[in-house]
């Protein structure tokens, strides 16, 4: 009998990514874990607005239904990380990279993203040179939030500057200006 894994199709706590029973994880999913670089991806599906070009699994505030909200998301992500650690068992591989993507992860408070990273460190062996990235939009970061992310172990930020031309940003439904993108990049370097 073969069991398929449920897929995450929403931002609700009731949408599991991994089976609760570790025996349901096929052996093929574990094959190569000891010899292949291991990375974690944490999806934060929240966006301030829907960009016309985007086809990612994202939600604006108006689209969130019962059971899904930003204030509980970090706890839900941490619960999924605990489940993943349990499913992978005691010999889980060292994490080489952590990528927090979306959506716009930095719509969550920096403290929530740091709490997720703290859980990664608690639950998984982490390589000494681990790369920890978060995606961000230029308008969703401040010098303070960037400093908090840096202090919390984030080593890289991917700023979603889709263009430096205002008319292109307007066509793409982007909220920031070219100047704000440059300013956010300077703030990230200063952090």
Image: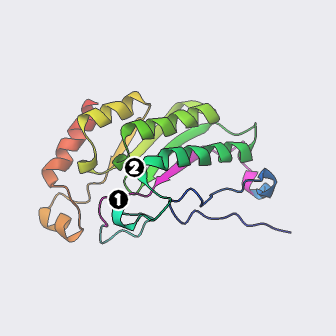
Callout 2: few (<14), some (14-19), or many (20+) C-alpha neighbours within 10 Å? many
Q: Nearer the viewer, residue 60 or 2?
A: 60
The magenta span reads 29-50
Instruction: Determine whether 161 is above or below 146 in the image.
Output: below
Q: How many marks?
A: 2
Q: Quadrant of residue 89?
A: top right
Q: Quadrant of the C terminus?
A: top left
Whole-percent x, y for residue 166 in the image: 13, 62
Q: SS for tag 2?
A: helix
Instruction: Determine whether 7 is above or below 86 in the image.
Output: below
Q: Which residue is mark 1?
A: 47
Instruction: Determine whether 128 is above or below 105 in the image.
Output: above
The reply to whether residue 124 is visible in this rendering is no
- Magenta segment: does it hold 33? yes
Callout 1: few (<14), some (14-19), or many (20+) C-alpha neighbours within 10 Å? many
Left of 129 or right of it: where is 188? left
Q: Quadrant of residue 19?
A: bottom right
Whole-percent x, y for residue 142 in the image: 24, 39
Whole-percent x, y for residue 110 in the image: 37, 38
Q: Residue at x 19, y 55 (%)?
A: 176
Give the label on residue 105, or none. 2
């Amino acid at each position: 009998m073969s069991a398929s894994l449920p897929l995450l199709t929403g931002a609700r706590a009731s949408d599991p990514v991994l089976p609760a029973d570790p025996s349901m994880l096929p052996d093929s999913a574990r094959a190569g874990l000891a010899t292949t670089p291991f990375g974690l991806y944490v999806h934060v599906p929240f966006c301030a607005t829907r960009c016309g070009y985007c086809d990612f699994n994202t939600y604006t505030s108006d689209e969130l239904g019962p059971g899904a909200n930003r204030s509980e998301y970090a706890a839900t992500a941490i619960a999924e990380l605990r489940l993943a650690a349990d499913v992978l068992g005691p010999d889980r591989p060292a994490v080489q990279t952590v990528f927090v993507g979306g959506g716009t992860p930095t719509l969550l408070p920096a403290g929530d993203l740091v709490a997720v990273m703290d859980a990664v460190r608690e639950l998984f062996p982490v390589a000494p040179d681990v790369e920890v990235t978060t995606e961000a939009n230029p308008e969703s970061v401040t010098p303070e939030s960037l400093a908090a992310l840096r202090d919390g172990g984030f080593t890289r930020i991917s700023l979603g500057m889709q263009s430096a031309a205002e008319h292109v940003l307007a066509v793409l439904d982007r909220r920031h200006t070219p100047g704000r993108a440059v300013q956010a990049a300077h703030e990230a370097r200063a952090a």
